[in-house]
Image (spheres, rainbow, N blue to C red):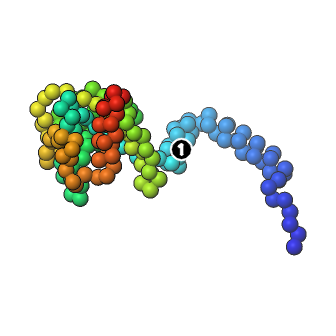
Amino acid sequence: MNVKNLSIRPYLYPRAISWKRTMARLMYLPGMEWAMRLGVKMVVPRHRVGVALVALDDENRVFLLRHVFHPAAPWGLPAGWLERKESPADGILRELREETGLTAVLGQPLSIEYSDIANHIGIVYTGQIQPGTPQLSREILAAEWFPVDQIPDDVLPFTRDMIETAVTMKCEGAL
């Protein structure tokens, strides 16, 4: 069997240059820049970006919401997905406002994690919820402050971990 080195093909190099020059010329045609941007948006890998808020008060309580759409673990942090061209900080403030009508002063990000299973990036912030009466959206059944040692059993392990991390950081003076 005659084996050739297939990784080096010098005869393809001029064709590659020619192809690039042709594409460069085509980009000057009306609408081609728009078509290229659309093509890139369709082909480039995307990630969903979720944001959440761990809000602790001065009495060492955490603010949790009972969500309609999470029957297995209904209690959770204020959270949601980023909208197009929205910063993570703006996204969590919007989600909190939409779900509860409340506002917050954000602290530092507590966690930034990537899940390759869901192609998901999650950013969890710390923050202080401003005084006010919650006005719950239709996707929220309840909003309550829980002492950190009395968190409901039906929260996700990730939620529990984020609360514990925030409490530890607060005790150490890092928040």
Q: Position of residue 137 (x, y in %)?
A: 16, 42
Query: In the visual, does 34 lie left or right of 175?
Result: right
Q: Count neighbours of disc 1 (C-alpha within 10 A) and say few if under 14, some if 14 to 19, many if 20 or more.
A: few
Query: In the visual, does 20 lie left or right of 147?
Result: right
Query: In the visual, does 125 lie left or right of 42?
Result: left
Query: Quarter of the image holding residue 175?
Result: top left
Query: From this viewpoint, which residue is outermost toward the right?
Result: 2
In the image, 8 versus 56, the foreground residue is: 56
- Residue at position x 81%, y 59% from top? 6
In the image, 37 versus 27, the foreground residue is: 37
The residue tagged 1 is 40
Q: Is residue 103 above or below residue 113?
A: above
Instruction: For mark 1, give the secondary structure.
Output: helix
The answer to whether residue 98 is seen in the rendering is: no
Q: Position of residue 99 (x, y in %)?
A: 20, 40
- Residue at position x 19%, y 50% from top? 152
Q: Amino acid at mark 1?
A: Val
Query: Quarter of the image holding residue 124?
Result: top left
In the image, 8 versus 174, the foreground residue is: 174
Identify the image quadrant of the N terminus: bottom right
Q: Position of residue 146 (x, y in %)?
A: 17, 41
Query: From this viewpoint, which residue is outermost toward the front?
Result: 172
In the image, 84 versus 161, the foreground residue is: 161
Query: Quarter of the image holding residue 79?
Result: top left
- Residue at position x 22%, y 41% from top? 148
